[in-house]
Amino acid sequence: MRDLALQAAGMLAILAALIHGALAELSVFPNAQVAPRGARRLLRLVWQASTVDWIAIGVLLIAAPALGSDAARHAIIALAVVVYGYATVGNAVATRGRHYGWCLMLAIVVLALLGL
């Protein structure tokens, strides 16, 4: 059961990352007025870096049960809880709870912790 919780957390993490990246490209950046042009490019790259990071954490969560190491499993779960916990709080505070993203990220944290 705990392996399934980790794998579900990983799949949700990848889904959240893909939504995050797509929303940026489809909604945020087409409407953003950022100058100079180099700052706009940097902002886009930094935004999408977190997308790539979240996908990587999702892959680690999915792979954790197959690693056969409790130490690795706990380290991956700790990493996911810190990264997604921070994102959950940041999203909830910044949007005053009006964006669904914090709920999705909280579900990832809970599922990861159930995988301990």
Image (spheres, rainbow, N blue to C red):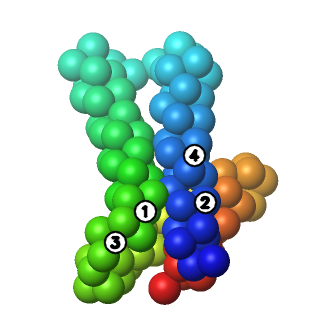
Q: In the image, which is nearer the foreground, mark 1 or mark 4?
A: 1
Residue 90 sits above or below residue 39 on the image: below
Q: Could you give the CA–CA distance between mark 1 and mark 4, rounded to whole angstroms?
A: 14 Å
**Residue at screen point 37% across, 34% down:** 48
Residue 29 shows which numbered tag? none
Asked if the residues shown at circle 1 and circle 2 are in contact, with their CB atoms under 8 angstroms apart, the answer is: no
Q: Name the residue under label 2.
A: 8
**Could you say where residue 68 lies in the image, as x and y percent from the top left?**
30, 76
Left/right placement of residue 17 relative to residue 4 reads: left
Q: Could you give the CA–CA distance between mark 4 and mark 3, rounded to whole angstroms?
A: 18 Å
Whether residue 71 is visible to the viewer of this picture, yes or no, is: yes
Element under disc 3:
helix
Question: Crowdedness of circle 1 by 10 Å Cα count: few (<14), some, many (20+)?
Answer: many
Q: What residue type is labelled 4?
A: Ala
Asked if the residues shown at circle 3 and circle 1 are in contact, with their CB atoms under 8 angstroms apart, the answer is: yes
Q: Mark 4 points at which residue?
A: 16
Q: What residue type is labelled 2?
A: Ala
**Residue at screen point 41% across, 45% down:** 55
Element under disc 1:
helix
Q: Which of marks 4 and 3 is nearer the N terminus?
A: 4
Q: Which amino acid does label 3 sit on?
A: Ile
